Amino acid sequence: MSARTKQKKRATMRLVYIDFWSALKMSFLISIVLAAVTVVLTLLGWSVLDKVGLVGSMTTFLESIAGAQGAALVAGLTFGNVMTFTLVVSLLEVIVVSSLGAIFAALFNLATNVVGGWKVTFGSD
């Protein structure tokens, strides 16, 4: 084999534009997946903590230390309140991640006007 046949073929391209709406849609889909994972992990985490009995023992512990104030502190720590808080956080996560994806695309497009794009090299093995 000659040295020429052993060389790998490489293609060089420049990424100079990211479509704003495509970036927004992709970041929205990613944020929906992250929000769903957040809700499921919170649900599973609460279930495990409740099955183990940690929630009940924490309530008893705080009541024994702080009395009525400890009971009032833990009274709001219910499954419904935790899931409501998780859903609010997930909704904010969807908004923030989608916005960041769109902002990144806009900033990238502005930056490529100045520097000429991002050089990407593709090669085959």
Image (tube, rainbow, N blue to C red):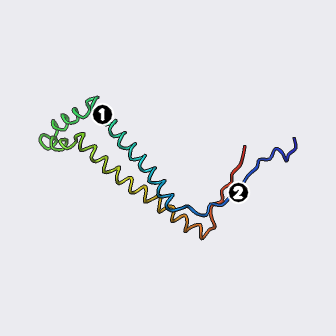
Q: Tag 2's secondary structure?
A: strand
Q: In this view, does 46 lie to the left or right of 98?
A: left
Location of residue 49 in the rendering, given as x and y in whole percent from the top left corner: 29, 33
Where does the C terminus fall, quadrant-wise? top right
From the viewer's side, name the closer residue of 118 and 22: 22
Identified at 29% across, 29% down, the residue is 52
Q: Residue 65: which quarter of the image?
A: top left
Q: Residue 13: which quarter of the image?
A: bottom right
Q: Earlier in the sequence, mark 2 or mark 1?
A: 2
Q: In this view, does 47 lie to the left or right of 75?
A: right
Location of residue 67 in the rendering, given as x and y in whole percent from the top left corner: 13, 40
Location of residue 61 in the rendering, given as x and y in whole percent from the top left corner: 20, 35
Q: Is residue 22 left or right of residue 91?
A: right
Name above or below for residue 122 compared with residue 14.
Answer: above
Q: Residue furthest top?
A: 52
Identified at 42% across, 46% down, the residue is 34
Which residue lies under the disc numbered 1? Answer: 47
* Marks 2/1: CA–CA distance: 51 Å
Where does the N terminus fall, quadrant-wise? top right
Q: Which residue lies furthest to the right in this view?
A: 2
Number of marks present in the image shown: 2
Say which mark, if any, is on residue 12.
2
Q: Residue 112: which quarter of the image?
A: bottom right
Say which mark, if any, is on residue 80.
none
Q: How crowded is mark 1: few (under 14 residues within 10 Å), some or many (20 or more)?
A: some
Please state which amino acid type lies under the numbered disc 1: Ser
Q: Tag 1's secondary structure?
A: helix
| Cβ–Cβ under 8 Å for marks 2 and 1 | no
Please state which amino acid type lies under the numbered disc 2: Thr
Identified at 42% across, 55% down, the residue is 97
